[in-house]
Amino acid sequence: MTTHMDNGIKTAFQAFSILIFLLQLPNHLAFRTNNEPWLTTTETKPTPTPWPKQFHALLYMNLTTTHLQLSDLWYDWPKGRNVNIFQKQLGIVLYDIEWNNGTSFYYTLGDNAQCQTVDFGVGIPRPDFLDGAHYLGRVVTDGFLCDVWEKVDFIWYYEDVVTKRPVRWDFYDGISSHVMTFEIGAVLPDSVVQAPAYCFTEPADENASSTLAKV
Ligand SMILES: *[C@@H]1O[C@H](CO)[C@@H](O)[C@H](O)[C@H]1NC(C)=O
Ligand SMILES: *[C@@H]1O[C@H](CO)[C@@H](O)[C@H](O)[C@H]1NC(C)=O
Ligand SMILES: *[C@@H]1O[C@H](CO)[C@@H](O)[C@H](O)[C@H]1NC(C)=O
C-alpha cells in the first residue's frame, strides 16, 4: 500500500519533470543524503502539516543554475485540479492545468499558441501526500527556521516551525520552489482553467503535438 501511494505521489508530481522535458530545459542533479551536516535534530519527530484543501501560492522557482520562473499555484482539492501558471524569466507564460482524472493540459495563449495534453493516469497530489515522509530535522532556509522532511527520494519539504506554512520544496531533479505568498482558501475562477479550443482539435500531423517542445 505504501508503495502504491508512493508511486502515486511521484506520478502526481511528474508534471514538473514532463515540463522540463517538453521545454527541453537542461537539468541538474541534486546530490543529497539523509544526514545533511546543516541539519539539527530535535527530540520529537514532528509530522508535516497537510496542504489546505484550497490555496493560492506564488512560487519563485529555480529550475537550474541558469533558469528561473514564477508560478501561480492554485491547488484545489474539492474541484479536483492543480493549476500552475508559469512565467518563464523573460519568456513565455505557460498554463499547466492538472485534473484529478489524470489529464493535464499545457498551453500558451496568443501568437503561436500551443497546447499539449498529457494523460498521467493518476490524479493530483492529495492534501496528505506528505504522510509517511521521513523527518530530517531543522534548518534555516530562506531565513525561516523550518522542519524538513524527505519522501521517497523525490521531494524535500521545508515547513516553517512557527506558522506551519510551507517555505520551500525541492524535487529530486533539482527544481527548487520557494513560497512567496500562501493564501489559504483562495480559489481560481473556473473560467481561467478552461483549456482553449486548440487543445481539443486533432493535430494536423503527427509532429504537431510535440511543437510545444520547441517553444
Ligand atoms: C539556483 O540554484 C542553484 C543550485 O542550487 C544555485 O547555485 C543558484 O545560486 C540559484 N539561483 C538563484 C537565482 O536562486
Ligand atoms: C478530465 O477532466 C477535464 C476537465 O473536466 C476534461 O477536460 C478531460 O477531458 C478529462 N479527462 C478524461 C480522460 O476524462
Ligand atoms: C515530422 O517531422 C519530421 C522531421 O522534421 C519529418 O521528416 C516528417 O515528415 C514529419 N511528419 C509529418 C507527418 O509531417
Image: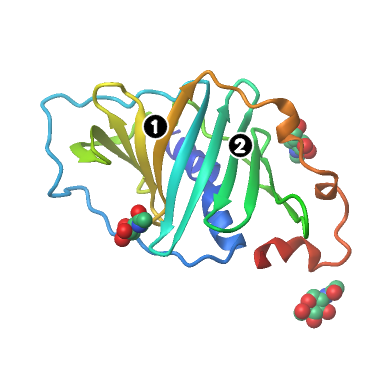
Q: Nearer the viewer, residue 41 or 24?
A: 24
Q: Is residue 179 above or below residue 214?
A: above
Q: What residue occupies the far top of the structure in this picture?
A: 185
Q: In this rendered view, identify the residue nearer to me: 79 or 150.
A: 79
Residue that badge 1 annotates: 130
Mark closer to the observer (1, 2): 2
215 sits to left or right of 111? left
The residue located at (63%, 50%) in the rendering is 93
- Under mark 1, the amino acid is Leu
Q: What number is the disc on residue 83?
A: 2
* Residue at image location 60% in from the left, 23% down from the top: 187
Image height check: is 185 above or below 80? Answer: above
Residue 145 vertical position relative to residue 197 in the rendered view, above or below: above
For the N terminus, give its image quadrant: top left
Q: Are marks 1 and 2 in contact (CB under 8 Å)?
A: no
| 37 up-or-down from 83: above or below | below
Amino acid type at circle 2 is Val
For the residues labelled 1 and 2, the Cα–Cα distance comes to 19 Å
- In percent of width and height, residue 72 lies at 55, 38
Residue, far front = 90
Label 2: element kind: strand
Residue at screen point 20% across, 27% down: 45
Locate residue 63, reporting x and y percent.
44, 56
Image quadrant, ligand 1? bottom left
Q: Residue 12's spot in the image, x, y percent?
A: 54, 41
Specify the label residue 160 is tagged with.
Answer: none
The quarter of the image holding the C terminus is bottom right
Q: Residue at x 55, y 30 (%)?
A: 75
Within 10 Å of disc 2 (Cα), the crowding (few <14, some 14-19, many 20+) is many
